[in-house]
Amino acid sequence: MRRGAALIPLLLAAIVILVAVSMLAGIVWLSPAQALGAFSAGPTDLARLIIIELRMPRAVLAILTGGALGLCGAVLQGLLRNPLAEPGLLGVSSGAAVGAVIAIYFGLTARFPYAAPVLGMCGAMAATALTFAFGRGGTLSIILAGAAVSGLGGAAISLALNLAPNAGGAFEIMTWLMGSLSDRSWDHVWLAAPFILVGAAILAGTARSLDALALGEAQAESLGVDLDRLRLTVLAGVALCVGAATSVAGVIGFIGLIAPHLVRPFVGHQPSRTPLPSALCGAALLLAADIGSRLLRFNSTEIKLGVFTALVGTPFFFWLVLRLRKTAP
Amino acid sequence: MSLLTVSGVTVRRGGRAILREVSASFSAGQFVAVIGGNGAGKSTLLSVLAGLLKPDQGEARLDGQPIGRFDRKALARRRAYLPQNPRCDWPISVERLVALGLTPTLPAFGRLTADVQVRVDRAVEACDLASQRDQAATTLSGGELARAMLARAMVGDPEVLIVDEPMAGLDPRHALDTAGRLQGLAASGKLVIAAVHDLTLAARFASHVLGMREGQVVALGPMATTLTSVLLHDIFDVEACVSGEGATATVDYVAGAPKGV
């Protein structure tokens, strides 16, 4: 049997189990019988409301967002041949955050509820375009451009916090920045899903080119890979996926960094075989993190999802840096 | 008829001309050793010949067609290119690395077919890598990696093989093997162009020599008549002695000879 043949079924099974748990877990614990009964209950049934209007969209968003982040992390690491690459690296998350913060800061969210998601996607697109424009001419320059764009995004967010007219506005911005899936509705799902799915479809076409890139840019080009087009394709796909994901769920770090590393040993480290399992792994990780953040409460305050993934993800990041330092020449 | 030509090729980088008005033509069946000092423009010329670098002036032609007009994949199927010190960024297996050489012939999705597997097996065997087949490419020694990369370049059975210093870092046995393999490819009707620093290996195995100095072609012709001590003095500014011919040719440098002697 091919190595890692069981990986995808296992990840799918994990997602199914985590979705089931996420239907039951929360402030109001439901029994499996209650949960199943919810689907046949009347429209005013509490369990039905909790499951269909609160927990299902939340789980679907966790799958979409986690999947998008895992997929983008794998494709970016393949493109940049850098194990530390993730959507945050190219400034995409930062750009999306700026867009949403602008919506909140100018009070657009009050008049038009979806201003944050829409502007978030615009911000992601702008940040990606900026990274691409300044990052032409190689992998190193694209990483540096991404760092610069992230820095710019951070500065813009700080400026918004600095100028926020009242403490409430600043608090709203901070809360959004922490990333969360609570109080999300089906509307959020319908808003993000098309962009994430289109982005994922775009990224799926890059597999062979990512494989060839393992040999470096010169060899990849000699094998018929159009590097400029590949970079543009990846950045477009990533902007759609991460822009949409970030704008509905806030800034969620480390999923895109961790997921590819977890699945890579099972697919022989092949860049082309990493993205699909990495997306599934990202979805499972975010579902688990969402359940964890729901259950971990301090004085009845829910831990924000982005804070949770950062707390869990940072040690992994340190471990990765340590390992790279050991293997680097 | 010439298979691959460059005419009037000039490449400038930062105001400095790396190649100046280079013209040369190569035919199928030749094994051309490109020799020259550091910074003579060998690697740049190979990139232009491979169609990877668009010159500021002049052009490269494959089969009479400007190389820039070829479809990328169609070109990739006909010529293979191996840069200097190639490396692999992920710990994929040697077998997978070699299979990457078939990228231009593979469909966008799907696994390797039986036919592909046969070709990969052949290249792996030919480059003496059978025992490293499942080893991660990042754990290979420099010489093993160089052989794996050569197998990668050869697996697609290209008409034109352009390699930058394929023998660098190889032990004597594998350097001889590699040179012999390139000679064999040329003998079977392929065009092989390789930058080579070991002049004795070049003299013994290559059929033609292209000497470069300061971005210009100093000489291009059959090895036996072109590689002379005069040429080596012109290219490297050293006194050298070329003795023997063909399989027993030897190039020696005269150590410490003062300039102008």
Image (spheres, rainbow, N blue to C red):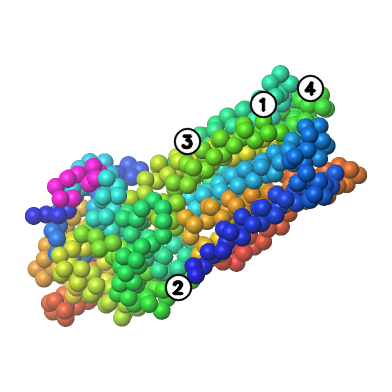
Could you say whether the residue bearing mark 1 is in a helix, strand or loop?
Answer: loop
Q: Which residue bears the numbered disc 2?
A: B134
Query: Which secondary structure, mark 4?
Result: loop
Tell me which label, 3 or 4, sits earlier in the chain: 3
Residue B112, placed above or below residue B167: above
What amino acid is at disc 1? Tyr
Residue A25 is situated, as x and y percent measured from the top left of the image, at 80, 48
Label 3, label 1: how far apart the Cα atoms are? 29 Å
Residue highlighted by disc 3: A133
In this figure, which residue is indicated by the disc labeled 1?
Answer: A114
Spatial CA distance of label 2 from label 3 is 40 Å
Please state which of residues B94 and A222 is positioned toward the viewer in this rendering: B94
Q: Position of residue B167 (x, y in %)?
A: 31, 70
4 or 1: mark nearer the eye? 1
Q: Looking at numbered disc 2 in the image, what kind of residue is underneath it? A: Asp
Which numbered dot is residue A165?
4
Distance between the alpha carbons at the discs numbered 4 and 1 = 22 Å
Question: What's the residue type where badge 3 is placed?
Answer: Ala
